[in-house]
């Protein structure tokens, strides 16, 4: 069968690209932390499926070296008992990565391990810098040699460079944070400290947990719960936290700013995060329930059944049902065993990527008017196919409701939303979008509902309104000079 007969087909649903996931663990009693990091990454797998890695160090060893392993693939594909067992150390960091096309290489997998005159750093980063190209150029002209094309390496180099002029590793992280602009949640392993940092706008989430004498930093609370850790609190936007046996949890809030200037990524609540997570004290599940309720209030329609597109549409569908009184049901069977790509023949048999991943349950939808709740429409290709799947299964009407506003602008802060011309809502009326996806009616969540959806937290609405919490770059260099995570 060779390459001329089969091709790799992407199974990306037409959604915003996932974020990365980071985790750090420091066990003050000296136990190995690699297995905890592994299970934490497993819980964060939804945030990135292209590569993953773990780096650990033994703080008791006189000659402190870092053991690391990373590769392309899912967590349970990359790690096995043998390579996990070789990672010995009581402090460590881990990472799962999502990247844009062309940047998916083993060299760009994280964590990054930097050896320099003051010791060794392990760095895991979720986010996107808008001044990475400028900072990278500055480093290159002073002799830096880069091994990757990711802006995370720019951050790691700046921390290492600042450490030469700082009393402590955390001071070096703070000084580097003052130089970088954009979105970041950082977990940094120094020889005897675990350091977490969050950008001043709080674009990316980061929380603190504890289990016995072990302390953790993680992108989401679901990672803490998976390994039996207690949630302590979120790292504040702009905060640098340092965890060590001598000082416990220490905080520097130099870069923190008033809550009204914060700009959390709203898609953490709409789509990215697991529904069992909490971010900055707000339940992701409840946020999605709220979105569904608001859709029922603002875009009602007569129907027989409310269904969600798995997985992120399910809670919003339940909220719509609760508010409207229309029964909630399950209309789709999702194939959980399909990865990000599959092989299909080029010629006579052409498998539809959406159908391989998602099938309608005919008995649930046949002869019924369906309200289909999904979290977003980007280009519209997938939405149109899902509407067709429901109608071919016998649905008499399909009314689409979206638990976010229409995408009208790109994102520069780590969410993979394309340029405006590729967005179905750009330069189209609501009726033109409805017609393009084949729905009987279409309704989006109102922009005004977003803060209410997350209990009044300050959020970024830039991809809907074009107004960002911070000045975006003058030109769109995403994927040009450096690759996003």
Image (spheres, grey):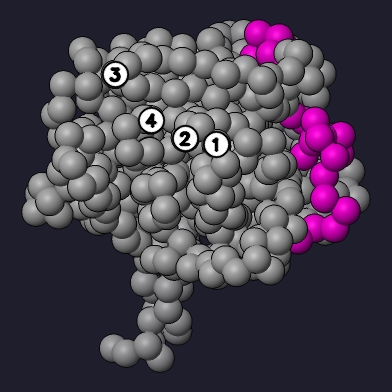
Please rate how many residues cluster around mark 1, counting C-alpha atoms within 10 Å: few if below 14, some from 14 to 19, many from 20: some
Residue range of the region highlighted in magenta in the rendering: 451-478
Q: Is 408 left, or right, of 72 in this rendering?
A: right
- Please name which of the two marks, 1 or 4, marks the residue nearer to the observer: 1
Q: Earlier in the sequence, mark 4 or mark 3?
A: 4
Image quarter of residue 421: bottom right
| Magenta-drawn stretch contains 458 | yes
Which residue sits at x=64%, y=61%? 139
Image coords of residue 62 (percent x, y): 18, 42
Position of residue 152 relative to residue 236, above or below, is below
Comparing 347 with 411, the one in front is: 411
Comparing 141 with 42, the one in front is: 141
Asked which secondary structure carries label 4, the reply is strand
Residue 245: mark in rendering: 3
Tell me the residue that label 4 is attached to. Answer: 194
Asked which secondary structure carries label 3, the reply is loop
Tell me the residue that label 1 is attached to. Answer: 166
Which residue sits at x=40%, y=26%? 217
Comparing 289 with 401, the one in front is: 289
Asked which secondary structure carries label 2, the reply is helix
Q: What distance separates the C-alpha of mark 4 from that of mark 2?
A: 10 Å
Image coords of residue 246 (percent x, y): 32, 16
Which residue sits at x=38%, y=38%? 190
Tell me the residue that label 2 is attached to. Answer: 169
Q: What distance separates the C-alpha of mark 4 from that of mark 3?
A: 10 Å
- Please name which of the two marks, 2 or 1, marks the residue nearer to the observer: 1
Q: What distance separates the C-alpha of mark 1 from that of mark 3?
A: 21 Å
- Please name which of the two marks, 4 or 2, marks the residue nearer to the observer: 2
**Magenta segment main secondary structure:** loop
């Amino acid at each position: 069968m060779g390459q001329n007969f089969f091709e790799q087909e992407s199974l990306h649903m037409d959604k915003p690209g996932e974020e990365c996931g980071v985790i750090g663990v420091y066990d003050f009693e000296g136990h190995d932390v690699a297995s905890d990091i592994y299970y934490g990454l497993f819980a964060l797998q939804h945030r990135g499926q292209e590569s993953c890695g773990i780096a650990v160090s033994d703080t008791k060893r006189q000659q402190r070296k870092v053991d690391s392993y990373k590769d392309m693939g899912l967590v349970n594909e990359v790690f096995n008992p043998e390579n996990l067992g070789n990672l010995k150390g009581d402090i460590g960091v881990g990472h799962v990565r999502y990247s844009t096309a062309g940047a998916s290489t083993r060299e760009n997998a994280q964590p990054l391990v930097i050896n320099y005159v003051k010791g060794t750093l392990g760095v895991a980063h979720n986010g996107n810098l808008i001044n990475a190209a400028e900072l990278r150029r500055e480093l290159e002209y002073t002799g830096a040699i880069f091994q990757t094309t990711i802006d995370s390496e720019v951050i790691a180099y700046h921390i290492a460079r600042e450490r030469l002029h700082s009393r402590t590793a955390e001071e070096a992280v703070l000084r580097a944070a003052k130089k970088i602009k954009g979105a970041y949640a950082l977990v940094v392993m120094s020889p005897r400290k675990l350091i977490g940092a969050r950008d001043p706008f709080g674009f990316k989430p980061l929380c603190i947990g504890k289990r016995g004498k072990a302390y953790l930093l993680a992108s989401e609370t679901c990672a803490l719960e998976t390994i039996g850790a207690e949630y302590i609190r979120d790292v504040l936007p702009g905060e640098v936290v340092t965890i060590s046996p001598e000082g416990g949890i220490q905080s520097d809030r130099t870069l923190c700013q008033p809550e009204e200037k914060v700009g959390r990524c709203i898609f953490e609540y709409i789509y990215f995060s697991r529904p069992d997570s909490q971010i900055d004290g707000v339940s992701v599940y409840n946020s999605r329930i709220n979105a569904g309720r608001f859709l029922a209030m603002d875009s009602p329609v007569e129907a027989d059944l409310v269904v969600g597109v798995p997985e992120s549409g399910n809670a919003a569908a339940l909220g719509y049902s609760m508010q409207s009184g229309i029964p909630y049901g399950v209309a789709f069977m999702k194939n959980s065993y399909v990865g990000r790509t599959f092989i299909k023949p080029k010629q006579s048999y052409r498998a539809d990527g959406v159908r391989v991943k998602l099938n309608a349950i005919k008995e649930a939808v046949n002869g019924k008017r369906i309200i289909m709740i999904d979290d977003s429409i980007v280009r519209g290709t997938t939405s149109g196919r899902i509407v067709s799947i429901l109608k071919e299964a016998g649905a008499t009407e399909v009314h689409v409701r979206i638990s976010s506003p229409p995408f009208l602008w790109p994102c520069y802060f780590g969410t993979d939303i394309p340029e405006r011309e590729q967005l179905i809502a750009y330069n189209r009326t609501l009726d033109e979008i409805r017609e393009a996806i084949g729905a009987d009616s279409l309704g989006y969540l109102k922009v005004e509902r977003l803060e209410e959806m997350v209990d009044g937290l300050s959020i970024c609405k830039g991809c809907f309104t074009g107004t960002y919490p911070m000045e975006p770059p003058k030109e769109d260099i995403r994927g040009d000079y450096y690759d996003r995570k």
